[in-house]
Image (cartoon, rainbow, N blue to C red):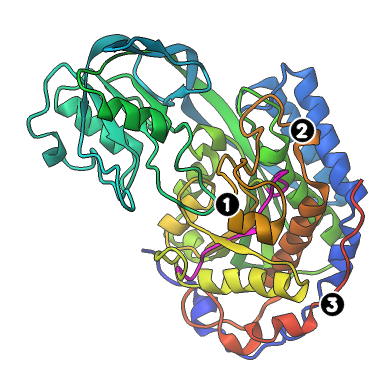
Amino acid sequence: MTGVSPALASGSPGGDGWQKLNSLALRTAITADGLTRHLDALQSIAVRNGGNRAAGTPGHEASGAYVETRLAKAGYKTSRQYFSYEQFVLEDSAFELTAPTPRVFTADEFSAMSYSASGDVSGPVVPVDLNLTGDRASTSGCESADFEGFVEGAIALLQRGTCPFSDKVANAATAGATAAIIFNQGNDVPGDDRTGVVSGTLGTASAIPAVGTSFAIGESIAATTGSAARVFVDGTLKNTKTFNVLADTSGRASETVVVGAHLDSVAGGPGINDNGTGSATLLETAIQLKRLHIQPQNRVRFAFWSGEEDGLQGSNYYVSQMSEKQIAATAVNLNFDMVGSPNAVRFVYDGDGDAFGAAGPEGSAEIEKVFTDYFAMKKLPTAPTEFDGRSDYFGFIENGIPAGGLFTGAEGIKTDAEAAIFGGPAGAPYDPCYHQACDTTDNVDPVVFEQMADAAAHATLAFAKVKSWKHGHGWGGNGLDKITEHVQNRGSHAFR
């Protein structure tokens, strides 16, 4: 855990930042046309570059150049933070049951785990510490004791839950497994799909091949006596050089507000909702701050991350390069990753932990409150979403920096209760084109996107302007409690 910046520790409460905040001018300047132009540009870049904007590709290079050009035109000095990492490239994969009843699974029924070892393995399937009833709370494969009596040379059948996929697969390999099958947990987590196909990453190269599949398939395999399977993964590791794009406003560097979104897409599509929407939100907010001549009290650093789709590479690298002093001088991280899902829920990260039991670092509760108070003033319902480590806030909260942000849902399935509150079809994904070629400009809910962009701009301005500090990261209540009193209510712009 890092220290506290001197300004945070010594700053007196009661400044006028929160009390006088009025984000109306900024929100009004962030128009449908401006946001749309950025999405259209990113879509065109993908079309010209093999259909994607993945890290290390010409599509990402062009995306970075577009952001730099627009920021420079607005008056920013941009910089590139270069870094390299081992990128997993999947060439081919297969998953099938070989006994007792052979079945070849289709491409939409399984997914090779990113950073899986290559191999073509066949053998008996051995379930490992599964929980298929009740709340399906699972620690399957998280402890070496789970593999007591495991048959060496078998394929381990593992259930999602509790620990990272990499830990499950590493423990399986240590126990003598020749491959691993990880199936979904089968429980209910708002904003996350715990029944469909697991599409995950191991982070670093594993010792054995590993694939993910759905809860239903895993449950069926576990219930079948004499199950045997084939797991085939053909992947390579490629050293990839890429870059984050950074741009700063004026203001106190000792209270830097890092506002981030990832600019890369998956290799399989143009990545317009994921995450052109977050990138467009950051870019338009930065442009309009300059156009309106807004002078932040605290420095805002707009960060367009790369390599997120390969395991949060860019944001993790950024944090890893910071000194203790620089970490202490980072007041907050705001993260915007997928804010225009076509079957959306307005999710706000659960900073205080009251919904999921795990709070973010001190100050995260105040970030959540800024968003929820704003949406309440706009009479727009929200729902909490968990800090599950799946986006670029992760490196920040791991280093004690308060974080928060917005999300409208990925592959998770909308519940009946959510459909009743937010509209859209229940039983369908929040984003049916998640990580697919159809994640184009047609895969964005324009009304929700603009609502989320306005909220992002409001929060950015709030943390850029606030003067009321308390000891430690975060803010005291004397200013925060009054923020919603000065948010002027207005209807959403028509987005077309």
Q: CA distance from mark 1 to mark 3?
A: 32 Å
For residue 95, above or below residue 142 = above
For residue 406, above or below residue 279 = below
Mark 1 burial class by Cα count in 10 Å: few <14, some 14-19, many 20+ = some
Give the left or right position of residue 483, taking residue 394 as reference.
Answer: right
Q: CA distance from mark 2 to mark 3?
A: 36 Å
Q: Are marks 2 and 1 in contact (CB under 8 Å)?
A: no
Q: Earlier in the sequence, mark 2 or mark 3?
A: 2
Residue 351, magenta (yes or no) = yes
Q: What main secondary structure does the magenta stretch of the protein show?
A: loop
Q: Which residue occupies 38% across, 32% down?
A: 202
Q: Which residue occupies 20% across, 18% down?
A: 226
State the residue position of label 2.
65
Residue 144 image point, x, y percent: 14, 38
| Residue type at tag 2 | Ala
Residue 329 image point, x, y percent: 53, 66
Q: Which residue occupies 74% across, 32% down?
A: 63
Q: Secondary structure at mark 1?
A: loop
Rendering quarter of residue 307: top right
State the residue position of label 1.
415
In the image, the segment drawn in magenta is 339-353
Mark 3 burial class by Cα count in 10 Å: few <14, some 14-19, many 20+ = few
Say if residue 233 shows up in the picture: no
| Residue type at tag 3 | Gln
Rendering quarter of residue 25: bottom right
Give the left or right position of residue 428, taking residue 3 as reference.
Answer: right
Give the left or right position of residue 207, taking residue 411 as reference.
Answer: left
State the residue position of label 3.
488
Q: Earlier in the sequence, mark 2 or mark 1?
A: 2
